[in-house]
Amino acid sequence: MATTVDYRSFGIDIDNAQKVAGGYIISARKLSLPHPWGNTEYYRHGWNSWTPTRWWSLDRKPWRIWNKPDRSLTAEDITTDSTTLHRSAMVTALNGPDGQTFLIGAINTSAPLLTISTERITATCEGEHAQWFVALGNERDVFNSYIAQIVSLENMRQPLHVMDTCGPMWSSWYSWFEEITEEIIISEISPAKELGYGAIQIDDGWQQSVGHWNPNTKFSHGIADIAAQIHDAGMKTGLWIAPFIAVSSAPVIERFPELFLHNDDGNLKPAGYNWGQYYYTLDFANPLAHEWLADTMSRLVHWGIDMFKLDFLYAASISGQRTGDMLREDAYRKGLETIRNTVGDDVYLLGSGAVINASFGVLDGIRVSPDTAPYWDNVERVNDPSGPSVLNALRNSLSRTWLKAAIDCDPDVAYFRTRGSLLSPEINTLTGQASLICEFPQSSCPSTWLTDREKEAVRQWINRARQRPKIQQISRYEYTIDQDLVRFGDYLHPTGRISDRLLVK
C-alpha cells in the first residue's frame, strides 16, 4: 500500500506556517527537514550564473567543479563548497517515487544554502532572519509558485525586458573575443541593421585593463563615437564592463587599495582567476568604493550606453575582511544598487557571474549558464561542468527557465556560422531554439563569416523572436515554440549514439 506523502512527512507543522499561494512560508534562520525518499533525485541550483545547475542524484558524488581550485574560485561559492555534501544555493527540490516534488526555497534571505542527504534537507543562511517557501506537488507547479513569491515581494522593482528595450542583440565576444577594434565594431553596424538586430553589444577588449575603464588605443575615437553611429542606424548600444573587479595593475588598486577586499593577513584577497591572472573585488562595506563605482558608471553611461553587460559580479559576494559590518550578499546587492541608482531605471542591466539570490529587482537580466563555445563539449576539461561548451550552457539554461517570471534569462549566444566552428547545422538550430525559449535572442556571428544561407537563417530567427512566439514547457527538457516541439533531452541525455552528429573539442 502506498504511503501518503504530505507536509508532515517533511517535519513541517503547517498550523504554524503561513499559507500562501502554492505552498507555505516558514520563518526560521535554520530548518532541518526529514524526508522519506532516500537516494532520490534532487535539484542542484548553482550560486552564480556559471555554477553547475541540474537535476542530480544523491547516490552520486556532488555535482560541482572538481580539482580545479582557480575555476572553483570563479564559478563556485568556495565559502560553502563541499566535496562530500550535496549542496544547493537558494533553492532545492526532491522528486519522490510517486511523481511528487518537494521544494524549499529562500525568500528575501541572505546567502541561503540547502544541504541535502538521503534523510533530510538542512536550510541555513548567513543573516539573523530568513523565510523559506515550501511546496509539494507537480514539478513545474512548485517552481512556478516559488518564483511567484519572489516576484510578489514588496518594493520589488519591475525589471525591463530585453525584447522591449534592446531587441535581438549582436555581441562581439564569441567571434572576436578581446581582439575587437573600433573598425570591427563599426563594420558590423550596417549588416546588423540589415539582418534585423536591435542592438550591438561591445564586449571585453575595449578597455585599457580590467579596472581601468577608459578606451584603449584600438578605440582611439572613443566609445561615445561608436555609440552615436549605432544610434544613427536605429539600434541600441551595449557595453561590457566588470565593474566590481580590477587586476593588480589597474590604477585604482595602485592608488586606492583600501577600496578592495582583504584577507585576514591584510593582503588583497583574490576574487577569481581570468586573463591569466588573479583579480580583486571592491569592498562595498566601504562608502568610498561606492563613490568610485558611481563615478565610473556615470562616465560610461554618458557615452550613450543603453545596456550594460556587467560581468564577474559574484566577486563582491566572496568572504573576506570587509571595512564594515555587512553580510557578503548584502554587500553585493549594495554594489548593484549603486549601479542602478547611477544609470537610472531605463538602462538595461544584464548580470553575468551574478549571484542569483541577491540580484532580483535590481538587474533586468542574468546569464543563467557558463559560457557557450563553438563546439558541443570539451572532453579535456574533465569534471568541470562550468567549462565553455554548448552542452554545459544548454544544461544550465534549461534548468533555470523557471526564473523567467522574475528576471530575463540569458542562455548565451545562438550560433549560425560554420566558419570557425565545430558545431553542425543541427546544433546551431538547437542553440537558436534555446534562445527563443529563454526569450533572449543574441548571436556573435559576424556578417562576413556567414554564407547567404546562414544570413537567411539569422533573419528568420530574428523575425521569429520579434513575433514573440508562444513558449510552453511540456516536460523538464521539452518545450514548444508555438506548435514546434523541441526535445532537448535527446541531446542532454541521449539513449543512443549521437557522436556522429556532435563534435567535441
Image (cartoon, grey):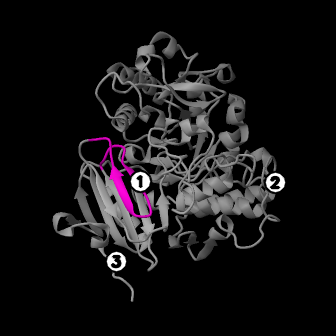
Horizontal side of residue 142 vs 212, given as left or right: left
* Secondary structure state at the residue bearing disc 1: strand
Figure label count: 3
* Secondary structure state at the residue bearing disc 3: loop
- Check the image and name the residue furthest to the top: 255
Q: Which residue is mark 2?
A: 451
Q: Which badge, 2 or 3, is on the more N-terminal residue? A: 3
Tag 2: residue type? Thr
Q: CA distance from mark 1 to mark 3?
A: 21 Å
Q: Which residue is mark 3?
A: 5
- Check the image and name the residue furthest to the bottom: 1
Which of the two residues, 505 or 288, is positioned nearer the viewer here? 505
Q: Position of residue 146 (x, y in %)?
A: 35, 62
Q: Are marks 2 and 1 in contact (CB under 8 Å)?
A: no
Residue 117 among those drawn in magenta: yes
Q: Which badge, 2 or 1, is on the more N-terminal residue? A: 1
210 shown above or below 409: above
* Res 338 → quadrant: top left
252 shown above or below 474: above
Q: Position of residue 165 (x, y in %)?
A: 47, 48
Circle 2 crowding by C-alpha within 10 Å: few under 14, some 14–19, many from 20: some
Horizontal side of residue 34 vs 232, given as left or right: left
Residue 463 among those drawn in magenta: no
